[in-house]
Amino acid sequence: MILEKITTPALVVDEEIYEKNKRTMASLLEGKKIRLRPHYKSHKCSDIALEQIKNGAVGMTCAKLSEALDLADAGVENILIANQVVDEEKLSRLAWLAGVCRLTVCVDNEKNIRDISRYAVLSGNTVHCLIEYDIGMERCGVTTHAEVLTLARLIGSLEGVELDGIQAYAGHMSHEISVEARERITNERMADLKALISLLEENGIPVHTLSGGSTGTALQKTRHDFYTELQAGSYLFMDSTYRLPDTPFESSLFVLATVVSVRDGLAVVDAGVKSCGVDQGMPVPVGFDVEKIVASEEHFQLHKPSRKLRLGDKVLLVPGHCCSTVNLHDRLYFFRDGKVTRRVPVTARGCFK
Ligand SMILES: Cc1ncc(COP(=O)(O)O)c(C=O)c1O
């Protein structure tokens, strides 16, 4: 099938660029201690996850229990839920899942740790834990070394839970345009993390894992080789928000859309916010410029396109955010030389619980 024949809007992947992004990541990691634990939320395709594991990833990172269940069902044996799981109903499934794969979850709260332990003991399984340490994002995590030490001691005293180490994710740095700022803040956080790890080790608590990092900080994380795991997700696809001056990765993911209405200075395509995530920014057309884009559910209005667009023309749009875009589609169409080479189901579409 040729690309133009796919019913639009559709999510398409340039296989050549995708393969290049994979090779680029492999070369960044070559000879380093840090291992890739790619984030599932960026593609949500179990076929791609298995491919990443086959190519050397230590396991997968995911955001939600439902994503972890999807990964385990596909045969992924080492899964990190890089989030807190709190509801009792989810904790029972979490504990069950720990008997299916090596499961790690982030923790930042004493009661939560006790609850996980209780369910793990009931199920007879061990849930591995990373204590989440907030290094400036102000999302989840504890903020002091003393709190980490207290939680680490608690985990050490309980059955059914085992401490792997620390998650320290600087998500607020991922899209920082200034390379200097990204480097400087990485260095500051690293010095603090080194002190934290020393404190834990002085107290007889080994830190096997230091997990974090993103596509935007992959260069820093691999250069310093201090973290043990890199959780980058977007590097395979990229998006229009990830156009950092130093990124070695390129956009491989596009929304294919059809021009459905034209008039002077305006072309309207059949893709909108129901097929292209705009939570981090508007899509960017490939091959031409526009003065502005206005979004609605099923349409993007392309104002003053620099190329003459005619009714029925096919347009490629680089999504503003690859992760939220993938979640809107049932499958990805990989293409090479204008021809569809494979169709990959988005198995964890809608897995946000
Ligand atoms: C905890 C965590 N790790 C890793 C990532 C991956 O980031 P990216 O897709 O920018 O590589 C994210 C993204 O939001 C995240 O929340």
Image: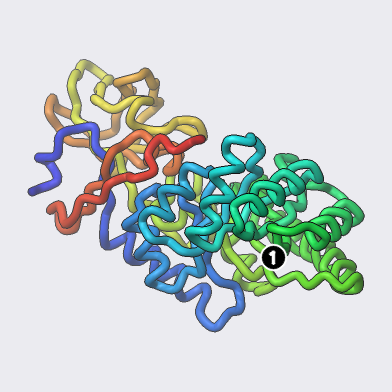
- Left/right of residue 218 with respect to residue 334 in the rendered view: right
Choose top left, top right, bottom left or bottom right for residue 47.
bottom left
- Left/right of residue 180 with respect to residue 153 in the rendered view: left
302 versus 64 height, above or below: above
Q: Residue at the spot x=72%, y=60% of the render? A: 166
Q: Residue at the spot x=46%, y=51% of the render? A: 40
Q: Depth check: 26 or 84 in front?
A: 84
Estimate the x, y position of residue 277 in percent, counting from the top left: 42, 33
Write down the residue under mark 1: 164
Estimate the x, y position of residue 71 in percent, counting from the top left: 42, 53
Label 1: few (<14), some (14–19) or many (≥20) C-alpha neighbours in 10 Å: many
Q: Residue at the spot x=69%, y=58% of the render? A: 160
Amino acid type assigned to the residue bearing label 1 in the image: Asp
Estimate the x, y position of residue 123 in percent, counting from the top left: 59, 52
Mark 1: secondary structure: strand
Q: Depth check: 289 or 53 in front?
A: 53
32 versus 214 height, above or below: below
Q: Depth check: 351 or 95 in front?
A: 95
